[in-house]
Structures are given as C-alpha cells and as structure tokens.
Amino acid sequence: MTVEDWAAGATIGGRPVPASPDLARMRVERRQRLQQQLEAQGIDGLLLLGSSAVAYATGATAPGEESPRAGLFRAVAVVVRGDETPHLFTAFPDGAPPDVPADHLHPPLFPELDDGIEAMGAALAEMLPTGSRVGVDEQTHPMRRAVGGYDWSDAGAVMGPCKVAKTPDELACIRNAQRINELAMQDAQSVLRPGVRQSDLSAVYLRRIFELGATTNGIDPIWQVMAPTRDANPWTLHGDLAYPTPTTDRFLREGDVIWVDAGISFAGYASDYGRTWLTGHDPVPTPRQQAQFTRWRAVIDAVLAICEPGATALELCSAAVAANGGERPWIEHFYLAHGVGTDSAEMPLLGTDLGDSFDETLVLAPGMVLVLEPIVWDEGAAGYRAEDIVAVTDDGWVALSGDRYDPFGVAP
C-alpha cells in the first residue's frame, strides 16, 4: 500500500481523507469546533495548561521535555468565546503556527510559581472579565490560591466533544505519525539478535524517528521480555500481567518473546506501535506461538467485521470475547481499544473498568480512532500482543497502521 492510496475511497462526513494533511485547514476547523462547543456549553472561555490541549487549540509545538521539568516552561492557551484565534503564552514562540496574530502571541506564564501567578491573573483578566464561566483542564496550587473571581468548570466538557471524532486532516496526521513509527521500528527489528541490549534497540529507534521527521518521542520505547507464566513476570497488585516496563540495558537472549511498544508525535498527533517479536538470528515461531497469533488475528477480525458507525463499544467488546472462546482478550487494567490524537490515549475507550453500562452508551461515529490492542495469553507459554489502528469512516473503517507482523509472516 502506497502513501497515496492508503485511504482511497475513505470519507468522513462525505469528505475524502487526504494522503497528507492540510495543517492550516486543520487548525481552522479545530478552532471552529472549540467555538461551537463553547457556545453549546454556555462557557465563556478556556484556560488550558495540558500540553495536548494547548497543541489542539493553538497548533503550537514545543521541545520534548522530561515530565518533572515540563511544567515550568509549559505553554498556556486561553480560548475566548467569539474570538476565532486562541491566545498562546509560550517560551518557544518559534513553535507558534504562522496564523497566530502578533497580538495573540505572548511571553510565557508560570502557573506553578507564586512569583508568576499575579501576572497570570492579570493576563487572564484582560481576556475574560471577573465572573466569567471558564473551563480549565488543570489547576496548580498557586492558581487555586490566587486566581479567583471565576466560575470554574471542567474544560473536558468542551475538549472531549471536539477531540473524540477527528477531521480528515487529523486522520492524515495520525497516519503519517504511524508510518514514521513503523519505519523506525523496522530498523530496530533488523538489529535484533541474541546479545543485543534493549537500550541498543532504543538507540536505533530514537535516531531513526527524528531522521524521518518526528516532532517528539512520546514514550520510552518498550522492549519487554515476557516470561512463560504470570508469576515469573514483574509483580502487580491486581495479579494481571505487568505491562509495560521501561527500557533497561538487559541483554536479549535466543528465544525471548518481546512485547514492543512505542509512540512518537508528528504535527502534534501521536502514534502507537505494538507488536510481538522473537529474538533469534532467524526466528521462526513455534506451532503454539503461531496459534497464539492466529487467535489474536481472529479477535481483530471479529471486531473489524462490525466496526462501523452506529456500533457500540459493548458490541465490539462482546465480539472480541466471543472470538477468544469466551475469555476477555485484554489486560484488566487496560482496554480492548483506546483512541489516539493529540494524546497518545484518549476517548473513545472500549472495555475499561467502567463496565458494560458505559460501553453500551459509547456509539461509534465517523472520525473516531481505535487503537485495538487485544492480548492472547497461554499460561506457561507466554502470549501474543500487538496494536492496530483504524479510523471509523462513513461506511466502515480504514486502517491507519500498516506494518507486518514479522516473524509471524502475515500481512495486515
């Protein structure tokens, strides 16, 4: 499948999904969605501190940072109802898109610091007068102490409906991010041999994603060796499989079953790659390992057979369980599927601990993205895990991922 024809014929709201995103159009449509939801929810504005929310509202990029340091230099966005362009406060103005007017691009705010909270309150008051109903996604301690006079509400009431169903350009961003991820993973798998360290795989992968145009690396790449039994794997409080664990300098050995996972960002949109690899000079799955993959594939096929607008999350989960002989094919503390967008895991979420009553109310619609990640586990023989990404279209679904399942030898 070429880049040009990966989504041939796929439409969202009657619009074709492009091979490459129109980023300017995408930003305009996201801002329009925000304004529509502010009006619908009766909210005067948004104060956004979360990096994915700021990226969605403004289209701004910023350097990747370790999480303990990310807060201090975080960007802040203020969206005012009736103002088509959000205000962006950032220490990295070069990451602002060209369509942000000069009077909407501001020096950074420091909501974590008592020394900076007065300036933040003053800036907010210039855009949203006291008494306004303001949606906020995070509140720091200084904000709670010193920024008052507003009717605070949960920004999720606006952000959730905006983000849950993607535009065609957003889907193109996710597909491009996933393609970068897959190509880098192929290079990492090509050096997998007994005696290679997990960190060696990370070195190959991280260098390659940036050569291919990734904006940031989203998570520490995971190369988790799975022991044959649950008890021999890392311990968990709830008794289920302990996954994922971070990269170490562990040497990989002949026959190791490795669950891999990685995510990068492109133009503000995340990807999610998951596969099961076998360590060896020319690894060949055993008959039992091949059977595990076949069961995993059967679960995926059963879900995709009913994946279309109007289907519920409960129906998809039930199909997955039935295809796995009546046993739930996903880890208890995860899910059958999650969404992906400016967050690496976001709504819709299928098969969570919220239960069947929640899944029954979650109805698929065009533009929703599902990262399907069932797991087949055979106690005493480890198991198979992988992730496939699809988007719900007007009349079915389209694949956003496209990598093979080597060494199991079956194309997606």
Image (spheres, rainbow, N blue to C red):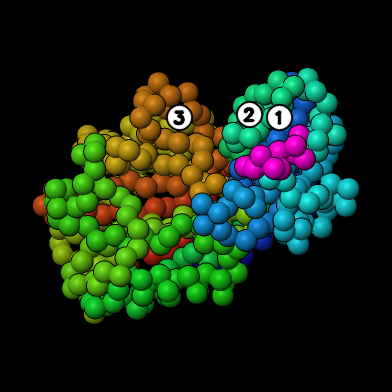
Q: Which residues are magenta?
A: 111-121
Q: Marks 2 and 3: CB-CB under 8 Å? A: no
**Number of residues whose C-alpha sits closer than 10 Å to that of mark 2, classed few (under 14), some (14–19) or many (20 or more):** few
- Furthest toward the front, the residue is 115
Query: Could you say which disc has been placed on residue 316 in the image?
Result: none
Q: Which residue is mark 2?
A: 144
The Cα atoms of the two marked residues, 1 and 2, are separated by 6 Å
Q: Residue visible at 46% across and 61% down?
A: 402
Q: Is residue 172 magenta?
A: no
Task: From this view, report whether residue 57 is shown above or below residue 9.
Answer: above
Query: Could you say which disc has been placed on residue 312 in the image?
Result: 3
**How many labels sit on residues?**
3
Q: Residue visible at 35% across and 40% down?
A: 334
Q: Marks 1 and 3: CB-CB under 8 Å? A: no
In front of the other: 17 or 335: 335
Q: Marks 1 and 2: CB-CB under 8 Å? A: yes
Mark 1 or mark 3: whose residue is earlier in sequence: 1
- Kindly identify the amino acid type of the residue bearing the numbered disc 3: Thr
Q: Nearer the viewer, mark 1 or mark 3?
A: 1
Q: Is residue 326 visible?
A: yes
Task: From this view, report whether residue 227 is shown above or below residue 185.
Answer: above
Left or right: 244 as drawn, with respect to 371? left
Q: What kind of element bears circle 1?
A: loop
